[in-house]
Amino acid sequence: MNIYVGNISFQLEESGLEAAFAEFGQVDSARIITDRATGRSKGFGFVEMADQAEGETAVQELNGKELEGRQLKVNEARPREERPSRPRY
């Protein structure tokens, strides 16, 4: 199950994100999205969990929970929408 995690503290590392979800089951991957230019966190990320039921439990338990001073927004990730390409001038 692919899970979106928003409102992540800018100081949180991927290992901390993974640890929060590992309480609920096996975590296959945890990624925090960063700005290409600066390398700074954009404040959101994705967690991949092997088991659907464990993922759903994690979403229910962690949505709204405070982690490093920020209240997490957690839900099942939606498929990425196709965006029209921007012309390069």
Image: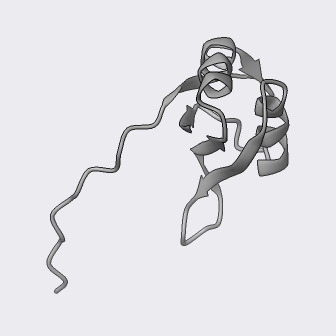
| Residue under the point 56% across and 33% down | 6
Q: Position of residue 26 (x, y in %)?
A: 78, 38
| Residue under the point 70% across and 51% down | 29
Q: In the drawing, does residue 50 fall left or right of residue 44?
A: right
As rendered, which of 42 and 22 lies closer to the eye?
22
As rendered, which of 67 and 10 lies closer to the eye?
67
Examine the image and state in which quarter residue 16 appears.
top right
Q: Position of residue 86 (x, y in %)?
A: 17, 71
As rendered, which of 24 and 5 lies closer to the eye?
24
Task: Looking at this view, name the residue that lies furthest to the bottom.
Answer: 89
| Residue under the point 70% across and 48% down | 30
- Position of the C terminus by quadrant: bottom left
Q: Position of residue 49 (x, y in %)?
A: 66, 39
- Position of the N terminus by quadrant: top right
Q: In the drawing, does residue 39 fall left or right of residue 80?
A: right
The relative height of residue 25 versus residue 30 in the rendered view (above or below) is above
Which colour scheme appears in the figure?
A: one colour
